[in-house]
Structures are given as structure tokens and as C-alpha cells.
Amino acid sequence: MKLAILSRALGSYSTQRLRTAALDRGHQVKVLNTLRFGIDLAGDEPDLQFRGKPISHYDAILPRIGNSITYFGTAVVRQFEQMDVYTPNTSNGIANSRDKLRASQILSRHEIGMPGTTFVRDKADVIPAIERVGGAPVVIKLLEGTQGIGVILAPDIKVAEAIVETLHSTKQNVLIQRFVKESRGRDIRALVVGDRVVAAMRRVAQGDEFRSNVHRGGSVEAVELSPEFEKAAVRSAQIMGLRVAGVDMLEGDSGPLVMEVNSSPGLEGIERATNLDIAGSIIDYIDNQVAFPEIDVRQRLTVSTGYGVAEIVVQSGSELVGRTLGESGLRERDITALTLQRATNVIPNPHSRYVLEDGDRMLCFGKLEEMRSMIPARRRKRTRVRKLPKAPIHDA
Ligand SMILES: Nc1ncnc2c1ncn2[C@@H]1O[C@H](COP(=O)(O)OP(=O)(O)O)[C@@H](O)[C@H]1O
Ligand SMILES: [Mg+2]
């Protein structure tokens, strides 16, 4: 394949290892400085320039977009997506994972363990928010920090409040998060490639530091992950739309607590700690997937008038409970179940023999009118446009 690695750090360990791994496997590979692209929307088709010239054809890209250029970098990745070039990490995935709040919001509906987190803006809401996550000591985080910078442990509630207010006054958005004491300055970094964890390490903070980042002096050792941790890591990466990701987890009393999902995980620490050829497994994975460029499924499936995708929930008391998918009547109503989610398991292309249970969620494609009645009432949107009130503004 012909691969472009999008990176500004040509000489870095990770970029060099990825490039070498691709060359060793007989691929054509170029490292292209992300900031030298030009997005070209003037012609008939989406196009890209590189260093002012039209770019040649690539089969795949591997984006390594640094934090400081998220906006431009994800725009370049999005343009490759529009040109049907395969990328293991989508522009949406990169943008969503970069912001710690946005990532937590997306993960929160998928039964992924996470440290209790709140986000408030008004001064009056700060102390109640700290109390909601268990009081002091409490962790305060900038939304887009990396390498441990912007992660603070506030020892008591007054100090915490003062830190949050100070940051707010400088227009910074901050998360307030439960301090996971039981992890004792340690965390787990799992490297996910495709649908498996290819390597994992534990990072241990130095001395009385609570942040285990290598940049904060943390030390690393290889670990064998339990299936519970592996599953949390793989699911988090997949939910975020990342096929190559570093998933950071704390070891909570009741299992893994996902803190963040990194879309450009560094390879040096983890390859040295585990002695595994992670760069090679990333290249092999891309080589395997090149035939499947990213498709915006929802957008493509809604081009036929009246058809679309919807999530149908099997509610308790519904006549669907206990019936098989075949007996559910969905097919007869021109509705196809694409996936069936039961608790944390997702069954692709569910067979007609599956017996439906209370709480099952089916991702369906079909006639919107037919599906409307099967969507829980509280999620239904008002469709009719109501008349404006005669006197729209009331005096108090
Ligand atoms: N809620 C928490 N409880 C305990 N330790 C934490 C918590 N959040 C972060 N840490 C420690 O701080 C480190 C950095 O936090 P993280 O959210 O990963 O920010 P960064 O993006 O800067 O790495 C983590 O690796 C972990 O060791
Ligand atoms: Mg981190």
C-alpha cells in the first residue's frame, strides 16, 4: 500500500518506528507535515494540496495530530475521508477524544467505568459540584491538557474552589473529578489496535506525585491486563472512533476507570517496556483495513426519502419482550436490525432466532414512519411547527 503518515515530528521515535515498520513490510510510505496541506474545495471533487501541489494518490493515512494543531489537523484528516482514503482514526474521533469533557460525555452512555466528573461554570455551583464527586481531595483538570500539565490535586475544598475560580477568571474550562485514591499514583496505558489490546503498561508516579505521566517522572512496566481492563480499553477506543489509541485507565476498587483516550499514543515508552513491535502491528492493521474507507453511515443511509436509522429500545412491558427477532414483525414493517446491543455486548447482524429482552437496543434501518412509534416517547421530538404566541414577551 501507499501510506502517508501525517506528522510534524519527522525525527521522533514514534514516527521513525512507524515509517521503518512500513518500509520493512514493503509498503511505500511518506511522512507529510500536517501543516503543509492545503484543503481545496474549488473543484468538482474534494481535493488536497501538499506544499502547494496537488497530492498524489494514497491508499491510507495514519494521522499523528499534535494537540496544538487539532483544528487544522482534523480538517486535513476529514478531507482525506471525503476523498475515500482509509484512516484508522477519524477526524471526529480525534476531535472528540482530544477534549476530556467531550470524550467523557460520549463514553458516559456506554457503561464504561469513569471517575466521577462534573463540569460547571457558575461560581455558586462549584462547591456543590466538588461535593457531588466526593469532596476533597479532588482533581481539577484543564479540558485539553497533556503530559500531566493542567491536572491538579486540590487538598481541601476551599483551595479547590479558589483554583476553579482562578481558572474560570482566565477563561479556562475545567473539569472537577473524583480523586481515585485507591489507584495510588498508578495508572494503566493500554494500546489498542483495531479490536484488541496489543500492549499494556502500568505507569507509576514518582515519589509523592499523583500523576503517573512519563513526562512527570513516572516509571513504566509491562503488565498483563485482565479481560475486564482489555474490554474497557477496546470499547472506549471503538466508541470514540479510534482504531489506534492509547487508553488510560485508573485501577478503581470496582474495576477499570477510563480517564482518557489518546489518538496519537507515543510508542517509545510502551515498546521499550513491553519489547513488542507495536509500530508493526499498527502498519499490519492498516494494511488489512485499507479496503474499508470511512463511510458516514447515517448520512448515506438517509438519502432515500422517508428512510433512516434509529435506535429502537425494547422496553419492559413491550410486546417484543420474549419474541424472537424473526417474530418481532420488524421485517414485515420494512425495518432491518443492523446491530443489537444487550448491556455492553453488541451483536452485529443479529439473527432472526435472537430472543429479545427488556432493555435491548437495536440499531435499525427502515421507514422512519414505521419506526417512530417504537422509539420511547420521551425521546420523540415535536414535529409540528407551532404558531407563535400573540404576545411573545411577557412582562414579569
Ligand atoms: N481522577 C484521578 N484520580 C487519581 N489520579 C488521577 C486522576 N486523574 C488523573 N490522575 C493522574 O494524573 C495523570 C494525568 O491525568 P490525565 O487525565 O491523563 O491528563 P493528561 O492528558 O495530562 O495525561 C494520570 O495519568 C493519573 O496518573
Ligand atoms: Mg494522560
Image (cartoon, rainbow, N blue to C red):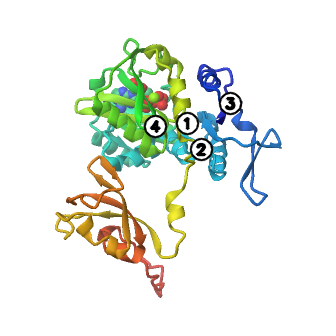
Disc 4 or 2, which lies upstream in sequence? Answer: 2
Residue 41 falls in image quadrant: bottom right
Decide which of 162, 231 is in the foreground and name it.
231
Disc 1 or 2, which lies upstream in sequence? Answer: 2
Q: Identify the amino acid type marked 1.
A: Ile
Q: Identify the amino acid type marked 4.
A: Gly
Q: Which residue is mark 4?
A: 194
**Tags 4 and 1 touching, CB below 8 Å:** no
For the point 28% across and 33% down, which residue is it? Answer: 228
**Tags 1 and 3 touching, CB below 8 Å:** no
Q: Which residue is mark 3?
A: 29
Decide which of 329, 70 is in the foreground and name it.
329
Within-10-Å neighbours for mark 1: few <14, some 14–19, many 20+: many
**Tags 1 and 2 touching, CB below 8 Å:** yes
Which label belongs to residue 86?
2
**Tags 2 and 3 touching, CB below 8 Å:** no
Query: Could you tell me how far apart the alpha carbons at marks 3 and 4 are, in whole angstroms?
Result: 21 Å
Residue 24, image x and y in percent? 62, 22
Q: Identify the amino acid type marked 3.
A: Val
Q: Secondary structure at mark 1?
A: helix
Confirm if mark 2 falls within 8 A of ligand 2.
no
Query: Could you tell me how far apart the alpha carbons at marks 4 and 2 are, in whole angstroms?
Result: 13 Å
Q: Secondary structure at mark 2?
A: loop
